[in-house]
Amino acid sequence: MATLSTQKISKLNANSPFSCYEACKKQLLKAVDWDEKSELTKALKEYVSVAERLRSLLRNGQGSMTREKWIDFQNQVSKTLGLVDERIDALSKSTNSSLPVIVDKTAKKHNVTGTQLRSGRNKTANMKGILSPSEKNENFEKILGRIQSEIVVSSPGIKWDQLVGLDSVKNVIHETIVLPSRRPDIFRGLRAPCRGLLLFGPPGNGKTLIAKAAATECESCFFSISTSSLTSKFFGESESLVKGLFYLAKRRQPSFIFIDEVDSLLSVRNEGEHEASRRLKTEFLIQFDGLNTTGEDRIFVMAATNRPWDLDEAVRRRFTKRVYIPMPDGTSRKAAILSLLSKGGIKSSLSIADVEQIVHMTKNFSYSDLAALTREAALCPIRELGPKIVRIQENRIRPLRKDDFVEALKTIRPSVCEEQLSKYIEWNESFGVTAK
Ligand SMILES: Nc1ncnc2c1ncn2[C@@H]1O[C@H](COP(=O)(O)OP(=O)(O)O)[C@@H](O)[C@H]1O
Ligand SMILES: [Mg+2]
């Protein structure tokens, strides 16, 4: 018996009236975007093309559909067409366009008033109504609202110069995210930036901080998600959450999605795992692949992990740039200690030579280990005071000395051991890109 090959089936599906209608909606989304950016001529051109496609669908779209289904479908398409025609009508007047515009007056019978479309701020609201996947999922609007309030961070407010060291990493990020977001006209075609970047490395070295600084720097809408936002607040809805997240990110371009501790969300798929978590991963991959199909999306996904080896291979492949955030070297440790001392609001009598000795004693300390060490050292002059602490004037407390650090080193030890570090280095050699 003759069977259809997969290729043939997908070709048939791609030509089905439903997928044609979906494609029209996608194009409509583009038109609405131009419209919202007040690029009226471009918007008009796009609307006209959508209207033509919708009309052709109404003429030839029945295919093998039953009569009832076809009437339903026709109604839906006509309604959309009505809205599009209304907008074309309004735009061609305001742009004085010479584009060949065919406005189907019969569309008005579909109860489209057009007043909302013409009235300033809400002009594209009806279009969005058509485009919103809420048709398919009643809860979707609710989820979008929750994403809006809990996951969209307007601006993290962290600046590049708050990051100590990490110059090479800053360069990579500048080139892959910041510049393309500022000059999309240059970074396209072969120069199109990658869509996904993974930061990996031992904990406490600024991965989360880098993401926040990058989001501030590229002036994008920042979506920050982590396992906790998924499991506690969205339990059972994580699949829709991912859908909603990418949907909103598309609408609010340029946008920047940050997934912290990505390993716990998108780890290797295995037999025993929960069905919901498997669906979440699949949805993520689908949404990720759906990005930038037109080459014009400005959505960037960044993820951070302390356990890169736990990532699902398919997820790893999507993050084409994988940047190692190593432990701070001597120079960075020195800069970090000096910065902690200067910002700490505490007097210190440490000379540069003292700091260098401390740097020497803190091999394999992460930034957060160094911060913990400095805090512990800062308590030494207080402990010496004993009960006198209650009465002493603040400016009479003695300044911090190198010995305080030596004392603190007895209790604060590096949180990552050599063995773990070599695991990161190995993974970096296999999968990382070297930051220049
Ligand atoms: N390069 C750095 N410069 C300044 N502070 C840093 C740096 N790296 C880490 N920190 C500080 O250390 C703490 C942990 O950083 P974080 O970004 O959460 O690390 P990670 O995400 O790699 O585990 C934060 O308080 C952060 O402010
Ligand atoms: Mg972190």
Image: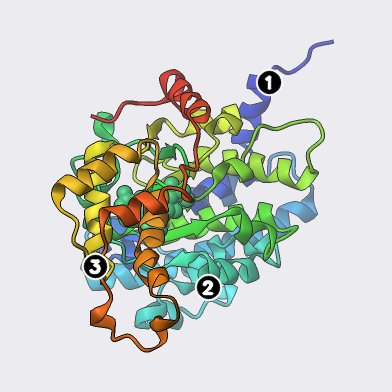
- Residue 334 seen from this side: yes
Q: Nearer the viewer, residue 278 or 382?
A: 382
Q: Nearer the viewer, residue 423 or 291?
A: 423
Residue at mark 2 to residue at mark 1: CA–CA distance: 42 Å
Residue 436's x, y, as percent? 23, 29
Left or right of 279 in this view: 289: left
Tell me the tag on residue 6. 1
Q: Residue at x 58, y 72 (%)?
A: 110
Which amino acid, by three-letter code, is at mark 1? Thr
Look at the numbered disc 1 and give the secondary structure of its residue: helix
Q: Quadrant for residue 429, please give it.
A: top left
**Do callouts 2 and 1 mark residues in contact (Cβ within 8 Å)?**
no
Look at the numbered disc 2 and give the secondary structure of its residue: helix
How packed mark 3 is, by other alpha carbons closer than 10 Å (few <14, some 14-19, many 20 or more), is some
The residue indicated by pointer 3 is: 399
Tell me the tag on residue 149. 2
Foreground mark, 2 or 3? 3
Which amino acid, by three-letter code, is at mark 2? Ser
Q: Nearer the viewer, residue 410 or 36?
A: 410
Q: Which comes before the other along the chain, label 3 or label 1?
A: 1
Q: Is residue 240 above or below residue 201?
A: below
